[in-house]
Amino acid sequence: EAGVAQSPRYKIIEKRQSVAFWCNPISGHATLYWYQQILGQGPKLLIQFQNNGVVDDSQLPKDRFSAERLKGVDSTLKIQPAKLEDSAVYLCASSVTSGRATDTQYFGPGTRLTVL
Amino acid sequence: DQQVKQNSPSLSVQEGRISILNCDYTNSMFDYFLWYKKYPAEGPTFLISISSIKDKNEDGRFTVFLNKSAKHLSLHIVPSQPGDSAVYFCAASAHDGGTSYGKLTFGQGTILTVHP
């Protein structure tokens, strides 16, 4: 079974530029998560989708971050414009059912973003 | 506000000995706890979990203990192996009005090094 795929693996941009990350969850997984992991910290949930609807985006900086999950499958996360403090690893995860805490979340390898 | 804390940034253990990783939480609504393991350049992978109705859960060499009164959980690895060297994250989830959307709050992580 293929795991969660993410691209690109690494991205370096200048501040005020835009960037987009892509995630393809495990086939058949209904719930998709985007996390931000700043160096030395644990992952922080940015947004959670169940199928193609948003369940939780309370920690998403909506003035510059946006995310979509078209057709309830793959997803993109965009930052526009990027700030220095956005430098982090962006992790995508998916789980099979309704997003309950007891559903195992499977993580992709992440995209490491460096903003100069 | 750091609701889940792992106060030891690193732990070094000899192969064959016990590794004990600790985690404290402040939110009394948390009722499901997980440990994830992360290797460099990979996403976190689920290791073991425990519900608040239990005080111990065991899976092979891994045992998680939960002390609800102290708001403390620990992960024991016995015996430790060099392949266990990784970053270990504690995570917690809370039910919300009887439903849970699977939102995880992570600690900062502890780097475990097991020496041969």
Image (cartoon, coloured by chain):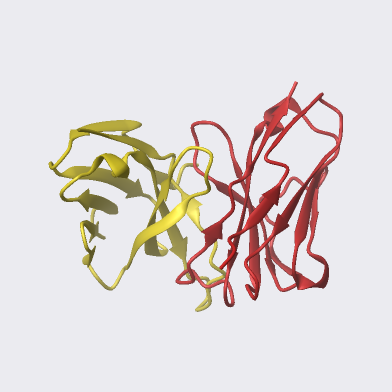
Q: Residue B30: percent from the left, percent from the top? A: 41, 62
Does residue A14 appear left or right of residue B79 in this picture? right
Chain in red in the render: A
For the image shown, how many numbered marks are present on the structure? 0
The residue depicted at 24 percent of the width and 71 percent of the height is B54
Q: Which of B107 and A10 lies nearest the eye of the viewer?
A: A10
The residue depicted at 31 percent of the width and 33 percent of the height is B8
The residue depicted at 66 percent of the width and 63 percent of the height is A25
Q: Is residue B17 above or below residue B29?
A: above
The residue depicted at 53 percent of the width and 61 percent of the height is A106
Furthest residue toward front:
A1
Q: Which of A6 and A31 lies nearest the eye of the viewer?
A: A6
Furthest residue toward left:
B17
Which corner quadrant of the image does residue B116 belong to?
top left
Q: Which of B67 and B74 lies nearest the eye of the viewer?
A: B74
Which corner quadrant of the image does residue B80 belong to?
top left
Which corner quadrant of the image does residue B50 belong to?
bottom left
Q: Residue A59: percent from the left, percent from the top? A: 66, 50
Does residue B5 appear left or right of residue A101 in this picture? left
Which quarter of the figure is the N terminus of chain A placed in?
A: bottom right
Does residue A45 appear left or right of residue B69 in this picture? right
Which quarter of the figure is the C terminus of chain A placed in?
A: top right
- Colour assignment, chain B: yellow
Does residue B96 appear left or right of residue B71 in this picture? right
Q: Residue B39: percent from the left, percent from the top? A: 44, 42
Q: Residue B101: percent from the left, percent from the top? A: 57, 70
